[in-house]
Image: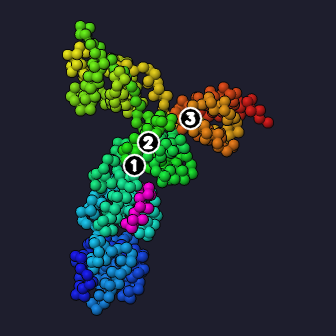
């Protein structure tokens, strides 16, 4: 119950007993409030014990219990002091339970239950530091004390949980203010979790799982300096994201933070991340996350007895039939999809350009299965059985799918650096620091984008080789042999020999072999 205006007949104990459960969940027995209450003689001796309680609910319970024990003759004065203390600490919605002076009311049961019900999803996606806390603080939804307490938590999940716990104790309009703050700080996908409105959606569980499952390999394969600017220009990252990535000390730490941020963003942001990887020479990382993609050209064989007047029109019709069948999961493609799925393959796109069908493979084993289905003409048979009945009146007798061998080879060449090759590069850093001459001629023989070359050239003189080997270790596995060839071609056979021995794991006679190249004393 809310007590309208001053009323000497309403007792402190009466109000607390009538609203105990509400007070327990919306009161914030903060140090600030307890400090204000030290001036109340009847409470002063109880403050230390209240502060010793572990949880906020326990502190609230202890404070309310102390108030319930106030003698009758002091209840009015204590209630006045308690109300004043609440208002000075920004808890008008709690003060209004005792004496209504504004429209501020505690969080409603409906809104509280919504926040509690969605708390798991909210904690997975909500990013308190991405301008959100600043917005809530400047709009008066949270206090500086709240802000400091939330920021003191370690990790995204704990910070998000503390923010939600704080909002639950605020006034009822705090939920709307939170939704507004989310929408204005690029977290519309989080607002969608709460209100079910807007165009942005959280990242799907499928791709969140992919980021977790492939995390270790992806972290070891990303070169973050070449990605951040593009991620910002595409609206995937904010200036807050950039600061958090670039403030990390090591490349691995920067990559870890980058993936942590992406996992909390929208599906659209994840798609932008993948597109950025593709554009910024990280095709091998895209393939690791999404699976190899193979494009097949589809050719329709038409009965010689049927004259096709408009081949372009027939192609459009075939394309429409295929797209509709796959999009609507029609029965005609059931067997085709079952065979593909059992081999870890799916149809990701049917598009123009003649007729192109793109297959997405779950992994490299699925890639090999797709190649076998293609070489054995099983794909031709499956497409013929699935689509020819619908196109029989056009004279279409069968389909042939053409996938060049170099399509499969292209995917294989994008395999991530193997553990053996990465270990060889990492273990060689100290030895090769002054043994490799990083010249323009040498760098031109490596498949490095402009940003990666600049990173090597701009590194301090003693760090150039270390930077180079780290960058190569984040490239596809084919980059290892390319490095060896570049060393051989620039008369740096000693360094190449050292790496080859490191790769083989045999060091027994390494120094005697290398002495011929490096003229050891």
Residue drawn at point x = 69 percent, y = 43 percent: 461
Residue 397 got which mark?
none
Q: Secondary structure at mark 3?
A: loop
Residue 159, percent across and down?
A: 42, 60
Q: What number is the disc on residue 449?
A: 3
Q: Please tell me which residue lies in front, 336 or 134.
A: 134
Q: At which x and y percent is residue 254?
A: 52, 48
Q: Residue at x 66, y 27 (%)?
A: 488
* Disc 2 secondary structure class: helix
Would residue 440 be found to the left or right of residue 25 on screen? right
Q: Which mark is residue 265?
A: 1
Q: Is residue 351 left or right of residue 434?
A: left
Q: Position of residue 108 (x, y in %)?
A: 25, 66
Q: Quadrant of the C terminus?
A: top right
Asked if labels 2 and 1 touch by Cβ distance under 8 angstroms, the answer is yes
For the rendered model, the colour scheme is rainbow
Determine contact: label 2, label 3, CB under 8 Å: no
Assess disc 3: are there few (<14), some (14-19) or many (≥20) residues with their C-alpha within 10 Å of its C-alpha.
few
- Residue 390 placement: quadrant: top left
Q: Which residue, as the protein is rendered here, is positioned at the far top?
A: 305
Q: Is residue 461 above or below residue 479?
A: below
Rendered position, 277 above or below 317: below
Where does label 2 land, which residue?
273
Residue at (37%, 80%) from the top-left corner? 85
For residue 265, say whether it is visible: yes
Task: Say above or below: 247 vs 356.
Answer: below
Residue ID at (38%, 55%): 184
């Amino acid at each position: 119950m809310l007590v309208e205006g001053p009323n000497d007949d309403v007792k402190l104990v009466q109000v607390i007993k009538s609203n105990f459960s509400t007070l327990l969940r919306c009161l914030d027995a903060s140090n600030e409030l307890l400090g204000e209450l030290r001036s109340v003689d009847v409470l002063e001796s109880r403050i230390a014990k209240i502060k010793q309680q572990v949880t906020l609910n326990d502190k609230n319970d202890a404070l309310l219990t102390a108030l319930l024990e106030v003698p009758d003759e002091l209840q009015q004065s204590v209630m006045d002091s308690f109300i004043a203390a609440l208002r000075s600490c920004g808890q008008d919605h709690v003060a209004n339970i005792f004496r209504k002076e504004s429209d501020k009311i505690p969080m409603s049961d409906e809104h509280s239950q919504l926040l509690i019900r969605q708390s798991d999803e909210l904690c997975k996606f909500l990013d308190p530091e991405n301008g959100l806390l600043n917005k809530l603080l400047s709009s008066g939804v949270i206090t500086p004390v709240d802000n400091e307490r939330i920021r003191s938590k370690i990790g995204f999940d704990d910070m998000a949980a503390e923010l939600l716990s704080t909002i639950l104790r605020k006034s009822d309009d705090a939920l709307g203010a939170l939704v507004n703050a989310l929408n204005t700080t690029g977290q519309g996908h989080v607002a969608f979790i709460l209100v079910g409105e807007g165009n942005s959606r959280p990242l799907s569980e499928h791709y969140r799982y992919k980021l977790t499952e492939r995390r270790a390999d992806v972290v070891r394969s990303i070169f973050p300096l070449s990605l951040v600017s593009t991620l910002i220009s595409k609206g995937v990252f904010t200036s807050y994201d950039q600061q958090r990535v670039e403030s990390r000390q090591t490349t691995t730490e920067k990559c870890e933070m980058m993936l942590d941020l992406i996992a909390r963003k929208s599906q659209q942001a994840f798609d932008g991340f993948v597109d950025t990887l593709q554009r910024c020479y990280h095709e091998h990382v895209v393939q690791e996350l999404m699976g190899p993609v193979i494009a097949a050209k589809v050719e329709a064989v038409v009965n010689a007895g049927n004259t096709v007047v408009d081949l372009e029109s027939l192609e459009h019709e075939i394309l429409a039939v295929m797209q509709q069948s796959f999009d609507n999961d029609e029965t005609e493609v059931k067997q085709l999809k079952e065979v593909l799925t059992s081999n870890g393959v799916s149809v990701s796109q049917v598009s123009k350009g003649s007729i192109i069908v793109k297959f997405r493979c779950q992994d490299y084993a699925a890639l090999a299965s797709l190649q076998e289905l293609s070489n054995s003409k099983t794909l031709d048979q499956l497409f013929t059985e699935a689509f020819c009945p619908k196109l029989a009146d056009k004279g279409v007798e069968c389909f042939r799918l053409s996938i060049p061998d170099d399509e499969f080879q292209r995917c294989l060449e994008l395999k991530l650096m193997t553990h053996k090759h990465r270990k060889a590069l990492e273990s060689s850093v100290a030895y090769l620091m002054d043994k490799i001459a990083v010249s323009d001629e040498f760098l031109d023989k490596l498949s490095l984008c402009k940003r990666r070359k600049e990173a090597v050239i701009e590194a301090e003189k003693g760090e150039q080789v270390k930077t180079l080997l780290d960058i190569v270790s984040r490239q596809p596995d084919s980059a290892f042999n390319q490095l060896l060839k570049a060393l051989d071609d620039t008369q740096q056979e000693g360094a190449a020999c050292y790496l080859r021995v490191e790769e083989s794991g045999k060091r027994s006679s390494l120094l005697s072999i290398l002495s011929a190249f490096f003229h050891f004393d």
